[in-house]
Image: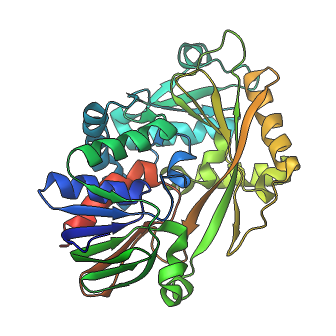
Amino acid sequence: MTDHTFDLAVVGSGVIGLAHAALAAERGLRVVVLERTDRPVGASIRNFGHVGITTQDGEGLEYALAGRAHWLRFAERAGFWIRPAGTMIVARADDEWSLLERFADMRGDAVELLSPARVQGHATIADPRLVGAAFCGNDLRINSPEAIPALVAHLAATGVEFRFQTNVTGVATGIVQTSRGDVHADRIVVATGHDLDVLFPELAEQDGFTRCLLHMLETDAPEGSHFDPVILTGTAVTRYDGLSQLPEAQSIRERMANDAPELIEAHVNIKMSQRPNGRLVIGDTHAYAQTHEPFKDEALDLLLLREFEQLLGAPLTVRRRWHGEYATAAADDFYVREPHPGVFIACVTNGTGMSTGMGFAESVLNRF
């Protein structure tokens, strides 16, 4: 490998790294992306493909709104599947409906309340407890296992250099040390997510970085069903700032703790998205540790299947199972540090990288 000088070197080819590379290349910068595997295989291809905008809040909402146009633009250029299909938050209890009413008042035209009959026009929800839903029409849906490789191919074809199977061993001002030689760059962005502790263990320890492990499944859809938007349920109050801070959220948490403590214990978020081939991506559980056991607990998958079979009113056939993983931190949700002049660590630590990552990357680049 020859030694080149770049305007920007990006460490990591997940969605945060690719967002920095794509937006920097648009600005005319010469960019190299360094990745230890031979293709992106991490959290960015293991998720729901949900660009969830409306349920964000504060800084996250700003980033999600800014990133929406970037996703649409790059989907057109790279040719990957994207749909402005929205998000539907299903209420199956009175306190959940009260929360959605307040949420709709707060978000205005971005949220439309739906009766049970109108819910069926968007998705086949068979749970008899259905009270209604909130439809967030501004949100997007993509197919992550297709979209991330397509974005890589597009960026490579338009001048971004990718060096896969290249392990980064050290970073300092102007230089990235790798297993294939040194790379020089005027600016460096480290976007390694939960693996921050590999390069900057002191910072990771100081700021409370851990790894969040998810159980996720892909199943066949019930015959004759359809699911246009991404589906959320009342458990979303535990995951999204736009919902979790509303007064009604506490009632939902208390009811869940009383009626279904196993959902609280496993930090379950009942969420679903349909792939273009018709299969359903369902999940997810959350567990937090520095290092996780490698074994998948079947009880957690059975818990997810129980919940979704109730929601959809049909048994589900599992086709694939996997672990997702992302960074969490006691520090900022949108983590930026400059450990050396010109070296920026950039990480989304609340699990919303697909939704907020494009706008977040733009804000980091604006620091240069």
Question: Residue shown at 80%/35% (left/top)?
Answer: 305
- In the displayed structure, 106 sits above or below 360; it is above
Q: Position of residue 35 (x, y in %)?
A: 43, 63
Question: Residue shown at 29%/59% (left/top)?
Answer: 20
Question: Residue shown at 42%/43% (left/top)?
Answer: 149
Q: Position of residue 3 (x, y in %)?
A: 25, 74
Number of labels in the image equals 0
Question: Residue shown at 42%/48% (left/top)?
Answer: 355
Is residue 246 visible to us here? no
Which image quarter: residue 18? bottom left
Is residue 215 visible to us here? yes
Out of 292 and 248, give the one closest to the viewer. Answer: 292
Residue found farthest to the right = 299
The quadrant of the image that shows the N terminus is bottom left
Residue found farthest to the front = 1
Q: Where is residue 52 in the image (x, y as percent from the top left)?
A: 45, 43
Q: Position of residue 15 (x, y in %)?
A: 41, 53
The quadrant of the image that shows the C terminus is bottom left
User: Does residue 186 appear to the left or right of 81 in the view shown?
Assistant: left
- In the displayed structure, 41 sits above or below 334; it is above
Residue found farthest to the left = 28
User: Does residue 183 appear to the left or right of 303 in the view shown?
Assistant: left
- In the displayed structure, 351 sits above or below 209; it is above
User: Does residue 333 appear to the left or right of 357 in the view shown?
Assistant: right
According to the image, what is the colour scheme of the structure? rainbow
